[in-house]
Image: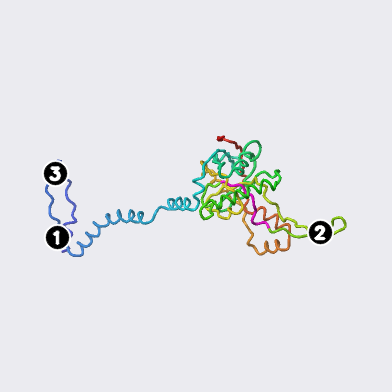
Amino acid sequence: MSQRILNTAKPTAAPTQTQRHHPSPPQPPPKLGRRAASAAIAIAAAPALLSVSPASSKAQEPEPEAVGVAGAAAAAPCLAELPVTATAFLDVSIGGEPAGRITVGLFGDAAPAGASRFLSLVTGVGYRRKEFVKIVPGYVQHGGVVSYPAVPAVTDRLAAEADALRARCPGGAVHGAAGAVSIVVRDPSLPPPKPKLVARGGKLEVEEEQVGVAPNGTEFVITTGAAPELDASAVLVGRVLDGMDVVAKIAAVPTVRDNAASPYFRVAKLIGDKRAVVAERGFNRPYTKVVVSNCGVLSKTE
């Protein structure tokens, strides 16, 4: 049997020109031993298995990107369905270098106060030369315009729009996908007002003191994924039409480590140490300056 297998493995002479053009009829395969025959069958079957396995695996398991897009659409249908009534742009620089342009479509019908607020801030000197101040998993946040006062009449109307949109979206998931642009109108992390005694006209009165700074309705966020925590604090005003690659560049900038879980920080916060408050403001802040170098309105329907 060894001699027979060895003979079949011998190299044959190269075919002549005539043989190449006029091949001879196929010859019956040489007889092999049981072990050699099994090996030949395995080798012959291997390419077929390799070609079938990935395809069948791919058919059973959908691509991650397809799952993400389908999941996002199911989680936040409002984002894709709300009509765009105006478009604006944000040119971004990172570390002084141009990073690209973000084009935003605004929902003037669904959120008239919010869209109008955003449009007024992208014109003139509103958002121009102002920084992104927070980068966390799920969204990036722009610092807005600090010099603008917090006007309760404005922020209350924006908050009412946020509640209406949350009620309109199935399941209340407004920020369930990447690309949502929203204005921050509430801060759920603010503690409740503290009562204090105030002397007025020779009498002591109890007054509530607001701890922390309430949002003034100019900060905005852009989601990089599902961020349901924003549903309670921000009003959806639009979506990114183009430039999610620029948003991804912003999200990739290294930030100051969030040390809120540290026992030392928690004790300092508990006893009212002002250093803890200052440190907390720096958590998740980008090490490199991320600035809106230019902004404006591209189109607007009357």
Left or right of residue 261: residue 43: left
- Quadrant position of the N terminus in the picture: bottom left
Asked whether 184 falls inside the magenta stretch, the response is yes
Q: CA distance from mark 3 to mark 2?
A: 112 Å
Instruction: Locate residue 206, reporting x and y percent.
Output: 79, 59
Mark drawn on residue 19? 3
Q: How dense is the environment of label 2, judged by Cα within 10 Å: few (below 14), some, or many (20 and up)?
A: few
The residue type indicated by label 2 comes to Glu
SS for dot 3: helix
Of the 4 image quadrants, the one containing the C terminus is top right
Label 1 residue SS: loop
Q: Amino acid at mark 1?
A: Lys
Q: Which residue is mark 1?
A: 31
- Residue 147 location, x and y as percent? 71, 43
Q: Amino acid at mark 3?
A: Gln
Q: How many marks?
A: 3
Disc 3: CA contacts within 10 A as few (<14), some (14-19) or many (>=20): few
Please provide percent x and percent y for residue 128: 64, 39
Range shown magenta: 181-190
The image shows residue 89, relative to residue 52, as above or below, that is: above
> CA gap, disc 1 to disc 3?
24 Å
Whether pointer 1 and pointer 3 mark residues with C-beta atoms closer than 8 Å, the reply is no
Which is nearer the eye, 51 or 159?
Answer: 159
Mark 1 vs 3, N-terminal side:
3
The residue lying at 58 percent from left, 53 percent from top is 231
Q: Secondary structure at mark 2?
A: strand
Residue located beneath label 2 in the image: 205
Magenta segment: does it hold 65?
A: no
> Which-is-in-front pick, marks 1 and 2?
2
